[in-house]
Image (cartoon, rainbow, N blue to C red):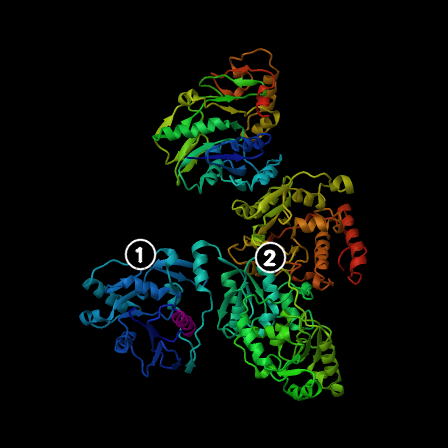
Amino acid sequence: MKLVIFSIILDGEPFVEKHLPIFEQLSIPWEWRIAEGAAANTHCTAWCKPQAPRFSRDGTSEYLTSISTHPNVKLFRRQLWDGKVAMCNACVAGIDEECVLLEADIDEFFTAPQMERMVQMFEERPEAMRAFFWCRYWLGPNIIATSTNGYGNRNGEWLRAFRFRPGMAFTRHETPVLDGNRGIAISREETKALGLVFEHYPWLLESTVSAKEKFYGYTNALQHWKRLQENGKWPVADLSRFLPWVGPNASADFVGEGVGADLLK
Amino acid sequence: MPTISAICIYSGRLPQFLESLASFIAQDYEDRELLVINCCVKQTLAFDHAKIKVYNLKENVLPVRAKNGAMQYARGEYIIAWDELSVALPNFLTQIAAAVQGREWAWLNSELCLDTAGNMKVTQGSEFSFVFKKSVMAKTGPYPPGIRGASDRNLMAKIVALHPGEPTVVHPENINLIRLGTPEERERVMPDAKVGMVKLQPNLSKDYAALAEIARTGRREHRLCVVSLGRFGDIIAILPVLKEIHDLYETPHLMVSAKFAELLEGVSYVKPFVTNLDQAELGSALTIAKSAFQIVLVGGCWGKGWHQVIRTPSYNRDEWGNLGLLHRFHEQDLRPVFDRRDMEREQALLDLIRGEDKRPMLLVNVSSGISSPCPECAALLPEIQQVWGEMYHVVDLTKIRAHRLYDFLLTFESAAALISIDTSFLHLCSATSIPVVAITSTTGKSLNADGTPWGATLVRCGNGVNHISYTKVFDDNRKELHESIAAALERPNLPVKVRPSPPLGYKPTARRVFHLVDRFEDTDRKTLERKMKSWATWDDLYVTGQMIPAHCWSYPRNAKDVLGESKSAPFLKDLLAHGVKQCGDDDILLWTNDDNLIHPDLPEYLKFHLSVYGPCSIFRTEIRGLIPSLKLTPEQFGKTSKESHVGRDGFAFTKRWLVEHWDELPDWALSYRMWDIHAALIIRQFYGIKTTNKNVWDQILPAEAPIGYLGHIAHTSAWTINMDSPGNTHNGLLFKSWCEQHLPNLKVTPEGNLA
């Protein structure tokens, strides 16, 4: 089965340039579909701050243009989308065969062998319609969320892979709901047992933290994040002392100097 | 195949009927006949066609009685009612025949309806999509009474009751019947005012198949059509342009009059679009072409409904101007190419002409010129024979008949010279290197700006051409004529050099269009609202990949720092450099203001323009009030505004051109006055167009794209607030100094504004 990876992007540096070299290692048929532009705060992302229509301003646009002629890459661009769900649906419209659909947010990475294993998993389990995954949720170059069923890997997170059939469409992006995709889901315990845990870098760099502060409206997010980076006592059992929005049962730990950033190299 | 008899009740609605009649004639189903029952007694219809019979009634009768009366004359096995207010696409009767095969009746369940606004939609099949076996009437009886189609529907009901069955389902893309007007619009169509004898002239005024395709897909399948309704010579004269379009963009359609379409059997690089219209009906032809093609170019220069701007002394040069290639008129390797010659026919013709005479041939046509006749010139032939006939085999071409005009090519290639008044030969000879003496007319009512007559043919290429006008050829004992013949005979007739076609596989239409815009944060809400209306038109093109955004938010230089301006503004060349970095050599960079609406047809138009011509500037269509629909064609969109604006809102270049001409472009500051006009004049200079204070407002192909591709919602421009600002002064001085060097006659103020 083909693997179709889709991403929705605005200002995706430094992550955006890391994906294609990984995909090009795949030995299975694949395609990367990308929607770029600002998403209006509507539908499932109505809680986000309003966005001015634009493309990326950090070099992502230019990078996407440079890969736009790659035979396995399809680009969809609008300065203003009717919410993130419209971006997702632009990506999946026109897929004309059954495939494994992988949502790859720009700061999320599976390795090539992991993705091949994922497709094999769906082929071996024809009854399975979607799959959940654990991730290593990076809160800085050195810090990972260690919550179980808490911030970073809450209950119900992370739904990322679907058995896609033509005609299906998303009705939500956060959390993803693919209309027409009903049936058995592969749990994250099962996918973890197959080694399918992805790297997730939402709070890796100062630049990405600032962007999230603007888009999601987390007040003083950067300031709080810097305090976490400067923390010297590990593990942190109550992450909300540093990042007030994380909710209960959230913890974090230090994993080694710059390991997160190194992984991106 | 069973014969189908179509019965049409004509009630005097002549213009629509002529379309309906033409569509019957165009049917590809052979075994058909049309019985036209003329119920409009004040008119007597006259028409002669093997498959059409017209019955002019002498007294008023109800349509139902007329139909029943017609049945005795219908010789077909099947009967169908033919609507005077419908157009059937050529495949309609074939489709009907297939549907009814082996049955008593068939009813196609869908039709198309074309309203007067040009909208087309699918509607339910009417009585005009119902065909039945004539023999069923033995059981049903004749058409029962009823008006407004009720009679047909009542008969249909009887037939279906007798022979139950299902309608034939027709997929929307297979619908072949188009009703003209909605039911309400058809009700309002009044009979034509003509009285007495009416000679029918069937006419299809639109490409209905293309309209149906557009309605179905939203896209014009065919992109480019050149309209040239002239004679053989007129068509040959523009073949070099058509070949350039074919080589550099795509194979163009060429709309030609039926009488002259045979010429195109000799060329592979045009798709003939044959019409019954003639040269005088250029306006009507353009209307048809514009309904079916995205890009329409005018290959003629006169006709009803067309205003020719005279720019040169010769009409064929102005035709090249209409086609955008006036600046290349004198290129020797741009020739008409006949790549489907029949060498057997040509050799046979040459052998016939030559006979046993081994002397070099001097080909002469001085007595048969149709486009510009010269009866007196016939007297030149015996004189030419007397002076040159000893050394040369003087051939009177008027006595020679060829199967096709271009069959003369081998004869031209083998002859010593051609002397002709006939413009078809004069244009044909430019496909060879035959030395030519062209005797041409300069009569005509039109004048150039300097008062000299307009209209002479300017023969291109050949191997040297001596032009003599009709008015001068008899002067001074024909001295100039014979000197010209002598000079022509001195020149060799060598093999012609033709520009080679680009290699196979080169696809210029694969060019990408990059949309280059300088962007900055807009804090004013009203401004943002206005701009977002434009940005929505960009997004429609970005999301389909027709344009690639190349927005620039940060710049290496700022007018604020460099020029001491009060607000930030970039320099154009920095913006261009941003675009150039991202695109390939043959890609197109389109710069617009950040508040221009972009017509959806612009990317494709630019692919054509930049492929065949080169860079261009684009005028705006100023919008006040409601924004016109972008479903209008660019021409229609452009006509929604009566305002003229001398500035340019868009520029398009290829990267290759920009890089080559980089140093010629001054270092303009964007958002200030004059740089756009300055850039437009540089482009005009590239094409050899001399700008004057008057023509700077004009759209001149190919320097300026046709109007209607960019819209602009009217507002006060920021740069007009302080005309002496550093940015305005900077650009003004650049303009002034450039004009002093390149356009010294252009009136410019000391500040560098147009006077």
> What element does badge 2 sit on?
helix
Q: Residue B655 appears at what percent x and percent y?
A: 66, 48
Left of A17 or right of it: where is B452?
right
Q: Residues within 10 Å of mark 1 (few under 14, many from 20)?
A: some
Q: Amino acid at mark 1?
A: Val
Have a look at marks 1 and 2 and say if they share a chain. Answer: yes
The C terminus of chain B - image quarter: bottom right
Q: Residue B709 appears at what percent x and percent y?
A: 59, 55
Q: Which residue is mark 1?
A: B169
Span highlighted in magenta in the image = B14-26
Residue A188 in sight in this render: yes
Circle on res. B248:
2
Quarter of the image holding residue B114? bottom left
Quarter of the image holding residue B239? bottom right
Q: Is residue A207 magenta?
A: no
The residue mark sitting in front, 1 or 2, is 2
Circle on res. B652:
none
Q: Residue B263 appears at what percent x and percent y?
A: 54, 71
Q: Is residue B20 magenta?
A: yes
